[in-house]
Image (cartoon, grey):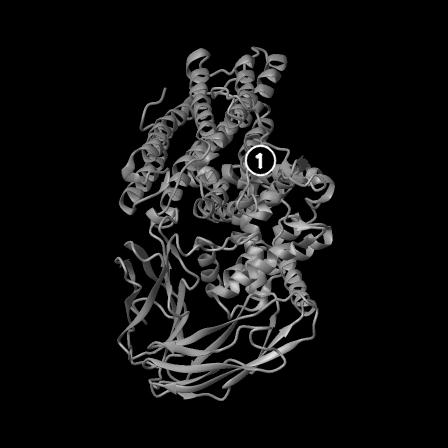
Amino acid sequence: MTVNNGTLYKYECSGGLLLPMINEFTWAKEVRATLYFFGLLYCFMGISIIADIFMCSIEKIISKTRRIYMATATESEPEVVEVRIWSDTVANLTLMALGSSAPEILLSCIEIVSRSFEAGELGPGTIVGSAAFNLLCIVAICVVAVPKNEVRTIRYMKVFAVTTFFSFLAYLWLLIILVGISPDVVEIWEAAVTFAFFPLMVVLSWAAERNFFAAPSGDKQIELGRFKPADKFSRDIQYFKDGELNKDALVSFVREVKKLNPKISDEDAAVLAAQKLVDSQHHSRLWYRIGATRNITGSRKTVPSMSMKLQQVYTTLNEHPDAPTLGEVPSVDQTENAILEFHAATAHVMENIGKFEITVMRSGLTDTEVQCRVDTIDGTATVNEDYVGIDEVLTFGRGEVEKQVTVQIINDNQWEPDEEFFIKLSLLPEDKERVGVEIGRISIMEITILNDDEPGNVQFTKRGFLVNESIGKAQIPVVRKNGADGEISVKWRTIDRSALAGKDYVGGEGVLVFKHTETERLLEIPITNDFCPEKDEHFEIELFDPTGGARIGRVNRTAITIISDDNFNTVISRLMNLTNANIHAVEIHKRTWGEQICEAMTVNGGDVENATGMDYVMHFVTFFWKVLFSLVPPSSLAGGWPCFFVSLGVTGVVTAIVGDLASIFGCLVGLKDSVTAISFVALGTSLPDTFASRTAAIKENYADMAIGNITGSNSVNVFLGLGLPWLIASIYHAIKSKDGKFNVPRGSLAFSVAMYTICATVCVAIILMRRYVKVFGPGELGGPAAPRYISGILIFSLWIFYLVMSSLQAYGHISGF
């Protein structure tokens, strides 16, 4: 009680470890509740940002590698493979689990200390509530987040089985010690066993990963880690050699990219190469968690920024059966498979054209029936506003080499600038193994909507082109401007200058056909590489004799200059520098304090050009936290360990503030600590994990990174978040208190644990059913639309059921144990 001008005030809702800092007890309860609510949200952002830094240190620690030398055919050049020192499973269950669960674990520890080693409800409630959210909500979101017609399965099922067993054991053990062995009391040996389960789980999970539980085979080989053997760079696990990108790999990649889309600039090719490098690297769950946090807070992204059109090109590169890696690109054997692709890469149509047809060509094997999917993708033109969407299966019968796809343009009678959308070819899910059919180079066609119905003028895009002598084939774009109506053709011929046909290039003449609405074709001229040093040489190509009402444009002749490799090397060096710059821009580790502070003070980490409006808003909101936490040692310093310990300490301070805010806010609005813990606090600390899991479900080939670690994290929460503080508290009471007992009222905690265990059992049963019942895909995530959404809604409903039942019991509407 306190007296102020004769008025008596009661100290309500106080008593936190750090808060309140000022005399706020005379304020209106509604004002205090509002301030504490927004303060809680703001501190959740702070926890996310310091967790980002904490996880960068962990990522640095666990990414340490050692070199293994392998015998090769050439004894003087042994193959060197860099292998991670940390096992994925051990890293997931120790440092990574600590990184993602640090707020919950620290909150439980801090609450015990702040209450003079007496048990509270907020810490244990947050651990159980967070486990429920992680298993039920995140799994539900990941089930439905997988792209259409795709599935994700758990790759390391034995590891998942071990961690799932321990997750059930953890919560059943809580019930046993709270209700069965010593009701409402936790003894030293019970707490010690709880804590000891943690190293036991790590050891057994590591043994399952190493397949120790399987029948022994005759051979024993060193496990060299997991990477993509098809990719030359992934085989070597060496994306940068002496700080530079592998030159030969980059040349192969850029060639293939420009075959797919000749309009790609050097800058865009460098972005695509950087993205390919990022995707080909081994990513941990922490990498996805860091990326999710940075997307939320308007910080530097962990992947290169790409425009919508560039994203479609990149998607096509990955979907193509012979998609270039940053290594050797396999050649296509056209006698093995049918190859399906568009006749041209672009087309221009009038807005009032109504319906028109585009051509899909078939080459290679033609004596079988093959299929592909055709669908549309928005650009600046929008489906159902500017055009009618397409999502159909195209069937080529035996001997068919050409099919037409009907496209319909919507005329809204309003002036609009030219707009474009895309039509994409892709394999059906059952054809992904590329048996009998594959998608060709031109798998995306760009459709531009304009207001012109003339046949158009045909010309070259420019008067000269430079090509390298070793390029193989020079691809010269011929465009159709000022109209695209009807089918036209134009003849072409080569003219010798200093370069001679038959010696320096394969010349001749031919006819180039533009079908109705097509606006660009590629004229391919083979270049001869004689491997002899010589001066630059050139020849010309001329367009003449157009048909179909078309006319020859102003640039009817172009010169092709065959340059020496020295000039070519200059271009490639520039590409390598651009690619390196893109890669370094998205590195999660910062080398210096200065670099770290500058990035914290600028929106999108300094990449202002690609920042969105939301990036600016969130950067302004989180500016204080970013600048404050930029003073933490960089993760690249001393192997990441200084950053690890400092950020862990800072996380503890912010978590203490969150504990006070949550407890006082719950008191002000009439919520018990147990209800506040399983709802607001559990939700706030788990949101970054939600976004990370969703991204991993979409991008990864397997479900392990998305949901495989959830059961392990839930187990670690109990073994560390309750086992450690309870062990300390029980020892303290055995020494200090009169009765020597550490009292932990079962109350809401035991009931919440029981409800979670029931819901978790049903959830795991649904996950296993999705894996082994064919109607679901089969796979833990994704699959057909109806079963996928039914599963997701059912699992999410389990979380709602858990919240409702636990809350009702906390307020006495349901009897507990």
Image height of 161 relative to 694, above or below: above
Left of 358 or right of it: where is 159? right
Q: Looking at this view, is 701 or 629 the one in front? A: 701
Left of 98 or right of it: where is 791? left
Could you tell me the amino acid type at mark 1? Gly
Left of 775 or right of it: where is 319? right
Please provide percent x and percent y for residue 212: 52, 21
Please provide percent x and percent y for residue 457: 42, 86
Q: Residue 536, located in which quarter of the rendered image?
A: bottom right
Q: Which residue is mark 1?
A: 225
Q: Count of labels shown? A: 1
Look at the numbered disc 1 and give the secondary structure of its residue: loop
Q: Where, quadrant-wise, is the N terminus in this rendering? A: top right
Residue 620 visible in this rendered orientation of the protein: no
Image height of 583 relative to 125, above or below: below
Q: Looking at this view, is 592 or 753 the one in front? A: 592
Q: Residue 284, located in which quarter of the rendered image?
A: top right
Q: Where, quadrant-wise, is the C terminus in this rendering? A: top left
Image height of 264 relative to 653, above or below: below
Residue at screen point 57% across, 24% down: 220
